[in-house]
Image (cartoon, helix red, strand yellow):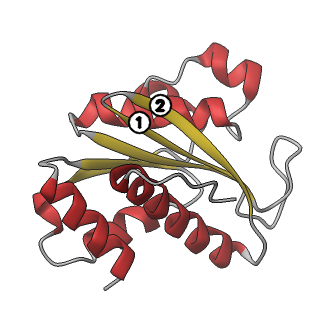
Amino acid sequence: MDRSAARLHDLLGQADATVATAESLTGGRLAALLTGVPGASATYVGGVITYATELKESLLGVPPALVEAHGVVSAECARAMATGARLLTGATYALSTTGVAGPDRQEGHPPGTVYVGVAGPSLSSAVALELVGDREAVQDRTCAKAVALLLAILSGEETSLG
């Protein structure tokens, strides 16, 4: 069991809050990390894996114009994915992951270019990450950063996560 994920569930429970996920490059790893904690069903409501752009648009409501203007490897897309997941599931908070796990470039971005989005009752933001490592390492680090981002928000701490 991941200690950060367990702490996140503890803080969510204390706040009577829930979380959902919208994943692209992590392909369900974030959901697996969050559900690996006993009792996760009390605070994790579910998530979607929107690997294809069309699903980001149809399931999460990411505007096609946003994708055309900024691409799916962008802070704007990460924010829209998190907002869409929150609206879709009714969760208090939602986390999203989008970017390039590798080995190939996408939309001109090198592997390790990642955006983690978060949406909540009074926030919608995204953090840009430049991660190193192979595909698996980039995916795992993205999940860890997503959990750390929401932990920091719930704890009232400032963090750059870069």
Q: Position of residue 13 (x, y in %)?
A: 14, 58
Judge by depth and name the residue closer to the eye, 110 or 76. Answer: 76
Which residue occupies 65% across, 19% down?
Answer: 66
Placement of the N terminus among the 4 image quadrants: bottom left
**In the displayed image of the protein, which residue is found farthest to the bottom?**
1
Q: Amino acid at mark 2?
A: Ser
Residue 24 is labelled as: none
The residue pinned by badge 1 equals: 119
Question: Does residue 129 lie above or below 8 as drawn?
Answer: above
Q: Is residue 140 left or right of residue 28?
A: right
Placement of the C terminus among the 4 image quadrants: bottom right
Judge by depth and name the residue closer to the eye, 98 or 120. Answer: 120
Closer to the chain start, of discs 2 and 1, is 1
Q: Is residue 87 left or right of residue 61?
A: left
Q: Position of residue 105 (x, y in %)?
A: 85, 54
**In the displayed image of the protein, which residue is found farthest to the front?**
157
Q: Amino acid at mark 1?
A: Ala
The crowd level at tag 1 (other Cα within 10 Å; few <14, some 14-19, many 20+) is: many
Determine whether the residue tagged by mark 1 lies in a helix, strand or loop.
strand
Question: Does residue 96 lie above or below 44 as drawn?
Answer: above
The crowd level at tag 2 (other Cα within 10 Å; few <14, some 14-19, many 20+) is: some
Residue 124 is labelled as: 2
Q: Position of residue 60 (x, y in %)?
A: 42, 30
- Give the distance between the C-alpha atoms of the residues marked 2 and 1, in whole angstroms: 4 Å
Which residue occupies 44% across, 37% down?
Answer: 82
Mark 2 in CB contact with mark 1 (< 8 angstroms) = yes
Which residue occupies 42% across, 30% down?
Answer: 123
Which residue occupies 23% across, 77% down?
Answer: 37
Q: Is residue 119 left or right of residue 25?
A: left
Q: Position of residue 74 (x, y in %)?
A: 70, 37
